[in-house]
Amino acid sequence: MSDKTDTTYDIVVFGATSFVGQILTKYLLKTYGTGKDLKWAIGGRSESKLQTLKSDLGKDGSELPVIVADASDESALKALCDQTRVVISTVGPYALYGEPLVKVCAETGTDYCDLTGEVQWIRKMVDKYEDTAKSSGARIVHSCGFDSIPSDMGVWFLQQQAEQTFGKPCRDVRMRVKAAKGEFSGGTVASLVNAVKEAAADPALRKEMANPFSICPEGHRSEVRQPNIKGAQHDKELDVWLAPFVMSAINNRIVHRSNALQDARYGKEFTYDEAMIVGRGLQGRLTAYGVTAALGGFVTASAFKPSRWVVEKFVPKPGEGPSPEVQEAGYYDLRFVGKTEDGKTIKTKVVGDRDPGYGSTSKMLGEAGACLAFDMADKPGGFWTPSSLMDGKLFDRLTSKAGLTFEVLETS
Ligand SMILES: NC(=O)c1ccc[n+]([C@@H]2O[C@H](COP(=O)([O-])OP(=O)(O)OC[C@H]3O[C@@H](n4cnc5c(N)ncnc54)[C@H](OP(=O)(O)O)[C@@H]3O)[C@@H](O)[C@H]2O)c1
């Protein structure tokens, strides 16, 4: 485990001037103040942008220390890491800018969390830096936003309840997005476009990304066929129409890695999938086909250079995203259904009180960082997932501070 104790800061927010970084900074300021229980600083590549952010935060923000570092400058990143126990990074697309910071955190025993949903990049980081992180004690936790904390912690909660109620975990878990309200930001679109672009150019990468166990450790790839909702589908049990859920490609890989890192706590036969409920009857059917076509159109357009510019022209640019009103009015409601191999069923729900991508994501990311800083003293270094490392401690923070609720609806 990392023995970093005498640093100036508990946390540095790297990329504080990003769209999501600014919301996170406001959240940390409101929740923890400055220089009190949590000692933290803001970082980024532009001194002037960081100073503007500070003045936008008014009197409360004036005490916030600033650290300037470019994401490609390893010696500046090392100087940043020498001052803190934890780095929260919102500098993305991570596949383009994120590697030097992960490398330096792994080398210096600095805990790290981020918002990446880029599976191919996570695989690469694990392969290159896991041994270093294990020996330095750095705990690296990717995907601490809407992808993938609600899914990962939602399954963790359901399995914990199943173990208490049935004495065993559920073999099969399905997550259905019942409702979600929010918008994309430019940074998220840029990351999605880049992931599609990389996959389009590399058939081996495409094959690897299609594997639900692609970020599991060697020897943890189950032979069990995983369900995968790729198109409009009628769910007979619920009598609703389902459409593919864009985040499932990252979420289900994180959930399988969590299972693997907990010695197959959910079972070696565990299956998991995600989809969106889009309605009932003819209207539901039409919406399900419409959503599938729109998703296919986005992927196709992002894959090829001639049409990629259309996506980049008409979606938000990096730095842009939903207004504070949209964030405030946003929410999500995720339903989980688990079944044991002998047919016992548990239904649970996870609700977030802000838009998924920004309002709620910032709170989850901030609490993941605080959890690393204060609750993980005895945990070893390595590449973890939110639930496999932070389990009950993160659950307490999400429910007491970050506006998430987890509830059992029914067991039978
Ligand atoms: N998992 C989730 O649920 C979730 C939700 C939201 C966002 N995200 C991800 O989070 C990331 C940020 O999203 P966003 O919308 O906030 O993006 P954004 O507004 O475009 O911000 C990108 C940030 O990267 C910084 N940056 C770029 N190149 C840099 C360099 N060489 N050195 C230092 N900093 C550099 C930019 O600095 P400047 O400010 O100086 O330009 C900016 O702060 C994206 O990868 C996105 O996909 C994930």
Image (cartoon, rainbow, N blue to C red):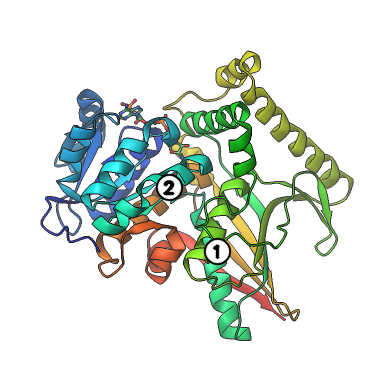
Q: Is 412 left, or right, of 206 in this rendering?
A: right
Q: For mark 1, what is the residue?
A: 154
* Viewer-side residue, 404 vs 384: 384
* Viewer-side residue, 197 vs 190: 197
Number of numbered discs present? 2
Which residue lies at the image location 39% right of the left edge and 65% below the top edge?
390
User: From the viewer's perspective, is the residue at label 2 or at label 1 nearer?
Assistant: 2
Which quadrant of the structure image shows residue 307? top right
* Image position, residue 394 (x, y; %): 39, 64
Q: From this view, report whether residue 331 is shown above or below residue 100.
A: below
Which residue lies at the image location 66% right of the left edge and 53% below the top edge?
177
Q: Earlier in the sequence, mark 2 or mark 1?
A: 2
Extreme residue toward the top, this view: 306
Q: Is 135 left, or right, of 248 in this rendering?
A: left
* Image position, residue 328 (x, y; %): 48, 45
Ligand 1 sits in quadrant: top left
| Disc 2: CA contacts within 10 A as few (<14), some (14-19) or many (>=20) | few
Which residue lies at the image location 72% right of the left edge and 80% below the top edge?
344
